[in-house]
Amino acid sequence: MKFDFRLKKEKDFEIVFKKGKRLFSKNLTLVYVPAEILKAGFAVGKKHGGSVKRNRIKRLLRESFRSFLPDLLNGGQNFFFVFIPKQNKDYNLVDFKKEMDYLFRKGGFLV
């Protein structure tokens, strides 16, 4: 069975944005709140470009998060995470992975 880690419900996004804590890096903002299960959402606004570009950014963010998933699941704590990218000329997988690693370590989610 495939584990679905995506945060999809509008209600869950509202909880994260209202009650969540924020961490900042150069190109990403992480908003998180403790939860019963580990899930991640990705908020990419229209200022980033058209739907094709926004969807590409979300795909890159999901893949970056997927690489940290085993370590986060073994951590024992569950959170709802929402990643918000900052405007940039170009986006790539390597940069998103570095930024997520920095944010997870800064927040104490990874040791």
Image (cartoon, rainbow, N blue to C red):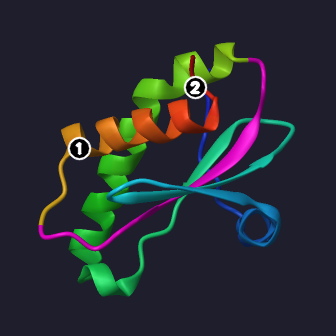
Left or right: 105 with respect to 55? Answer: right
Give the x, y percent position of residue 71.
Answer: 56, 17
**Quarter of the image containing the N terminus?**
top right
Left or right: 67 with respect to 8? Answer: left
Category of crowding for the residue at label 2, using alpha-carbon neighbours closer than 10 angstroms: few (below 14), some (14–19), many (at least 20): few
Left or right: 60 with respect to 2? Answer: left
The amino acid pointed to by label 1 is Asp
Q: Residue furthest right?
A: 36
Q: Looking at the image, which is closer to me, 9 or 36?
A: 36
Query: Magenta segment, which residues?
Result: 76-89
Q: Is residue 82 above or below residue 18?
A: above
Q: What residue do we see at 61% from left, 24% from top?
A: 72
Q: Earlier in the sequence, mark 2 or mark 1?
A: 2
Q: Is residue 67 magenta?
A: no
Left or right: 77 with respect to 111? Answer: right
Give the x, y percent position of residue 18.
Answer: 79, 72
Q: What residue do we see at 40% from left, 57% from top?
A: 28
Dot 1 falls on a residue whose secondary structure is helix
The amino acid pointed to by label 2 is Lys
Q: Which residue is mark 2?
A: 2
Q: Residue furthest top?
A: 74
Q: Which residue is mark 1?
A: 95
Q: Is residue 11 above or below residue 108?
A: below
Per the model, the C-alpha gap separating discs 2 and 1 is 26 Å
Number of numbered discs present?
A: 2
Q: What residue do we see at 19% from left, 57% from top?
A: 91
Q: Is residue 83 magenta?
A: yes
